[in-house]
Amino acid sequence: QLQASGGGLAQAGGSLRLSCACSRRLCSNNAMAWFRQAPEKEREFVATVSWRGGMTYYADSVKGRFSISRDQNTVYLQMDGLKPEDTAVYYCAASRYSQASTDISSYGYWGQGTLVTVSS
């Protein structure tokens, strides 16, 4: 019900765009977000967007390089200026609430993840 795509291999400084299609039942009226998990690390927040797209928040590590947007029930993550430390499995998530939040506990629905690998 959350289907992420767009991952792959990029060189440092390059760009990738992730997409996540969500069912209307899950994502209508709910905020959506991207998280990521690198090997042997905990899942961490990347970016979130409110239901109507008016509010966005970013992790400090990606601010100025990544941009989150949504078109109804599809959320996008434009990743520019990629760095090797951005290498991770990226997960899209749907919140239980309409307001955007950086708190992982707000998100009850998860996609399967898409791997992003950035080479130096």
Image (cartoon, rainbow, N blue to C red):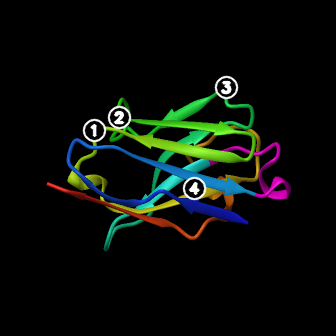
CA separation in Å, label 2 and label 3: 19 Å
Within-10-Å neighbours for mark 4: few <14, some 14–19, many 20+? some
Closer to the eye: label 4 or 1 = 1
- Numbered circle sitting on residue 81: 1
Amino acid type of the residue tagged 2 in the rendering: Arg
* Residue at (30, 53) in percent of width and height: 86
Q: Which one is earlier in the sequence, the residue at label 2 or at label 4?
A: 2
**In the rendered view, does 23 fall on the left or right side of 114?**
right
Please tell me how crowded label 1 is: few (under 14), some (14-19), or many (20+) other residues with Cα within 10 Å.
some
- Circles 1, 2 touching at the beta carbon (< 8 Å): yes
Q: Is residue 29 magenta?
A: yes
The residue under label 1 is which amino acid type?
A: Gly
Question: Would you say the residues marked 3 and 4 are in contact, meaning their CB atoms lie under 8 Å apart?
Answer: no
* Residue for badge 4: 104
Marks 4 and 1 sit apart, C-alpha to C-alpha, by 25 Å
Q: Which mark is residue 120?
A: none
User: In this rendering, is residue 65 above or below 108?
Assistant: above
Secondary structure of residue under mark 2: loop
Instruction: Look at the numbered disc 3 and give the secondary structure of its residue.
Output: loop
